[in-house]
Amino acid sequence: MSRLQKQLADLKAQGRRALIPFITGGDPAPAHTVGLMHALVAGGADVIELGMPFSDPMADGPTIQLACERALAAGTNVSKLLELVREFRRSNQSTPVVLMGYLNPIEHRGVAKFAEQARDAGVDGVLIVDLAVEETPEFAPLFRQAGLDMIFLLAPTSSEARIRAVAAVGSGYLYYVSLKGVTGAATLDVAGVAHKLAEIRQYTALPLAVGFGIRDAASAAAVGQVADGVVVGSALVSEIEKHAATPEVLPALLTAKLGAIRKALDELSV
């Protein structure tokens, strides 16, 4: 059982929802990323999704697009990102880290090489936004050999066939995109989320984490009623954007923002 799988199994046994924050690695500069990761853990993160900055993040809205631009301008690349995970692991061996990004930088590096280096740095899983499930026979064995969970996206428009295909190859958790749009959108239909999650659960026992549109404690608690975990991304990245010029204030801000969401989720378990 991987570190990610164990963490989620332990949470399920406790009747708790997983809190999965996302930040872009290297934003606002690589020197701050590890401190922000520790701040997320202090705020109650169970898993950290660390974005791999990319020049064309097609699934992301303006907030995370700008985060990618800041990170790239500050010199962040795949090698630097793996160094940051390795540094995080020097003092945290328990919190799973999932790298979230796009296929191009991974293919450019070489998939097998990337998988091995990610494992050695302390990465637990990968979520490659533009990796179609039809392409997994080429990639999945390399990630599995390295012991990395492969997390896939499902959406409101996902067909039964697509759900079955993703459920057959995914591991760790499945990420349900709650909105028909890009990251940072504001409208959240919890009833629609609940209906789709019930459909997905017919085909998988994997934990279901819901992202896109979760901005605060209230929206997280609403989704937490029906999901195994919630992903909070743009709301945190927005804070980083607002305070990019004064990054020393960010750890306390992120800990506090995430802490309020953690409290709301834990109250569901009482």
Image (tube, rainbow, N blue to C red):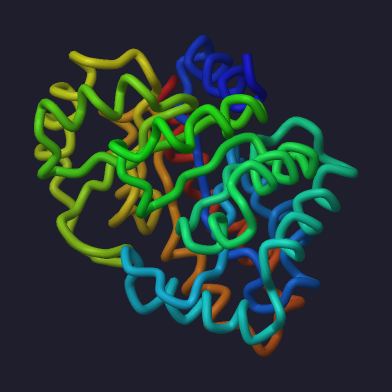
119 or 262, which lies in front? 119
Q: Position of residue 42 (x, y in %)?
A: 70, 47
Between 107 and 246, the one nearer to me in the picture = 107
Q: Furthest-top residue in view?
A: 13
Q: Is residue 162 left or right of residue 232?
A: left
- Residue at image position (80%, 72%) is 31
Q: Which is more toward the observer, 267 or 175?
A: 175
**Quarter location, residue 216:** bottom left
Residue at the image point whose x is 38% and y is 52% from the top:
129
268, 139: nearer the viewer: 139
Q: Residue at x 67, y 89 (%)?
A: 245
Which quarter shows the C terminus?
Answer: top left
Residue 194 place in picture, x, y as percent: 16, 31
> Residue 104: x percent and y percent?
48, 62
In the depicted structure, whether residue 89 falls above or below residue 103: above
Say above or below: 199 vs 38: above
